[in-house]
Amino acid sequence: MTILSTPSLYAAEPQIAPQVQNAAQASFKEWAEVLAIPNDSAVAADIQRNAAWFEQVFQRRGFHTRQLANNGKPLLFAEFPKSDPGLPTVLFYGHMDGQPVNPSEWQQKSPWVPVLKQRNAAGQWEAMPLDKLFAKDVNPEWRLFARASADDKAPIMMLLAAIDALKAGGKTPAINLKVILDAEEEKGSPSLGAVVKRNQDLLKSDMLVVLDGPMHPSNQPTLVFGNRGIVVGTLKVYGPKQDSHSGHYGNYAANPAQLMARLLASMKDDEGRVTVPGYYDGVKLDADSLRVMRAVPDDEAALRQRLGIAVADKVGQNYQEAMQYPSLNVRGMQSGDVGEKARTVVPALAVAELDLRTVPETEPAALVALLKGFVEKQGFHLVNGEPSDADRARYPKLASLTFESASASSSAVRTDLNAPIGNWLRRSLTKTYGKEPVQIRMMGGTVPTGALVDALKVPFVIVPLVNADNNQHSANENMRLGNYINGVNTLVGILSEPFSSKP
């Protein structure tokens, strides 16, 4: 197992007020306790256990709670008592479900038994007694390994610890606070939009803060103003009606694998740009956006080294610009067999699985229509389902291109960099850490903010709090303790900052 080192904030851990440090460390026992509850949303009973557990810990801190029905996988709503009805209401989003696990891939007894680890002299991770997590002095470089340790139970616990820290200091939030915990985020939040619409009055708010995702790899405080969407599809190219002997029919029957290869190759130029006419139309980057993107401290040489690539595609001038455009990705291909199963045949079929990452300027339906038109211009006749004998007799190049319906949970959304919510959060993080946070205009991945924004019509910003090298979605997921404590500090700063739309 290799985990790259995450740098400390500004080369040294920031000064943390005693009540914040104490509240963060006091929450470690609850954090370890909830990590022991499996949370794959494929198992409704596990989601019910998580919802019940989180409901109790929110209630202990004075929140009013309600489980929101969702086909046996309830979401959890919590609201802190209002101190002033005139204050703006901010809805915080997190998710209590996690990715499935393969226990054999984990370097510990179970993904559901959290293990505290530190690096040894050889740079390898070695287990420590869990009791050290609950001692007075903890090393910020220690990490807690378990499924969902970072994604996304840690940010939820950080928020609860921030409330504890405020109470210890005799303070209350400077905003009205609501929380919603998703139950199926790792499955694409298929029901989130419907649940929110059924509970719009309950969830009514002025702004949305999303507590999910990793911080910038520099480990500096980060704000993310948008996320790309996604739509997935399948491209099939048809050859002979069945796999056919390559000796008898090679040079006679067209090979669909080669037709597919030429078709896919025609979709991008040699520098990785999509060649489908109109694919990037609508994406306009103003001077302020370009300035913010250039200010992001990406180490692109290190990124290329980590990916094992010599050069990057030329869709944008840098990594951040590349994320502002829709993508066209071949996520898998198949035709015939390989290895020991390879046969001397002209395959009957070639299949390519595609995913298109969308941006707010490019609706999924528009990209799909452009792509279908492009395939047809390459000489292919598109069919629905398997081609008929009449299709085969008439058209020399046959293909099908189908896409799954896009949902609000998989849509692209973005908040203006100068929106009031951004000014408020930027001001808070700057006060807390003494310098402006890293600002990401649009991250490349997809989170279900679209469903919330579509239903509630509110601006949002993502506030990631976990270390970038947390092995999210993979085996040996982990959370750095320094990031956990700093995350509590960040949330104390946000909850304490009176809202103002001024920069």
Image: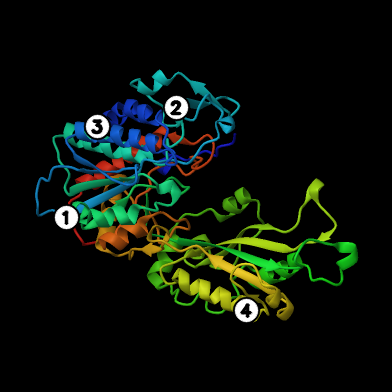
In the rendered image, which residue does mark 3 sit on? 56
Q: Are marks 1 and 4 in contact (CB under 8 Å)?
A: no
Eye-nearest disc, 4 or 3: 4
In the rendered image, which residue does mark 4 sit on? 376
Q: Residues within 10 Å of mark 4 (few under 14, many from 20)?
A: some
User: Which residue occupies the foreground of this view, 283 or 383?
Assistant: 383
Residue 395 relative to residue 190: left or right:
right
State the quadrant of the C terminus: bottom left
Q: Is residue 310 above or below residue 161?
A: below
In the rendered image, which residue does mark 2 sit on? 114
Eye-nearest disc, 1 or 2: 2
Between the C-alphas of marks 4 and 2, the distance is 53 Å
Q: Mark 2 or mark 1, which is nearer the start of the sequence?
A: 1
Disc 2 element: loop
The reply to whether residue 335 is in sight is: yes
Query: Amino acid under label 4?
Result: Glu
Q: Is residue 377 above or below residue 426?
A: below
